Amino acid sequence: MTPAVRPARGEDDLAAVRALCWDYRQHLIDHAPHGAEMVAAFYPPDLYARIMGDLPRIHARPKGEILVGTLDDRIVGCGMSYEQAPGAAELKRLFLSPDARGHGLGARLCLALVDQARADGYTVVRLDTMFSLTDAMTLYPRLGFVSRDAYYDIPEMARPIVRFFEKPL
């Protein structure tokens, strides 16, 4: 299997990205302590549906990006960025379908987003994840991300569950 990363192109790619994002949301419900409670607080279905419809605007060039990860030209992962604050890009919804894990595609997606943020003039890249997502908790420090305090207001119930990272560019 040949892994690759490229920008999302056209409605078919966006449909695949949206499907992966819904899978990611379900993954959080299924695999994170208090996942259902967290998802209900942060991403109730109606709000998440609106976000999914607005992905092309939220992550539009030149201040953002939507990338897909492929194995043999089949979309199996996604990641996106947007301007979170002046000089700071935030990476969102980095997710691989379970059958795509173990090919280095998660790291490739993340690093491609970092490279794009650097090329776009950002000085730092930020992201968050849940402590229970052990693959992500291992990946981000390996790619040079360091732990940091919350960079947005977070409900008290989420504080013990969510971990924040950043990488200076």
Image (cartoon, helix red, strand yellow):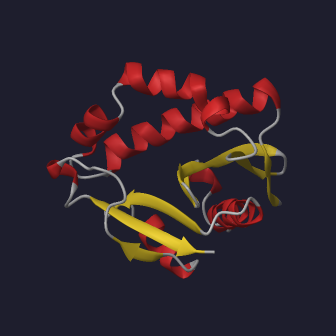
The residue drawn where x is 37% and y is 59% is 151
In the drawing, does residue 17 fall left or right of residue 138?
A: right
In the drawing, does residue 98 fall left or right of residue 130?
A: right
**Figure quadrant of residue 16:** top right
* Residue 159 visible in the current orientation: yes
The residue drawn where x is 33% and y is 50% is 31
Asked if residue 106 is positioned above or below residue 142 in the image, the reply reads above
In the drawing, does residue 96 fall left or right of residue 61?
A: left
- Quadrant containing the N terminus is bottom right
- Quadrant containing the C terminus is bottom right
Asked if residue 94 is positioned above or below residue 131 in the image, the reply reads above
* Residue, far left: 156
In the drawing, does residue 165 fall left or right of residue 64?
A: left
Query: How many numbered badges does the structure rendering display?
Result: 0
x and y percentages locating residue 33 in the rendered image:
23, 52
The residue drawn where x is 64% and y is 54% is 100
Asked if residue 37 is positioned above or below residue 123 in the image, the reply reads above
Asked if residue 34 is positioned above or below residue 160 in the image, the reply reads above
* Residue 1 visible in the current orientation: no
The residue drawn where x is 77% and y is 24% is 11
x and y percentages locating residue 2 in the rendered image:
83, 60
x and y percentages locating residue 146 in the rendered image:
45, 78
* Residue, far front: 86
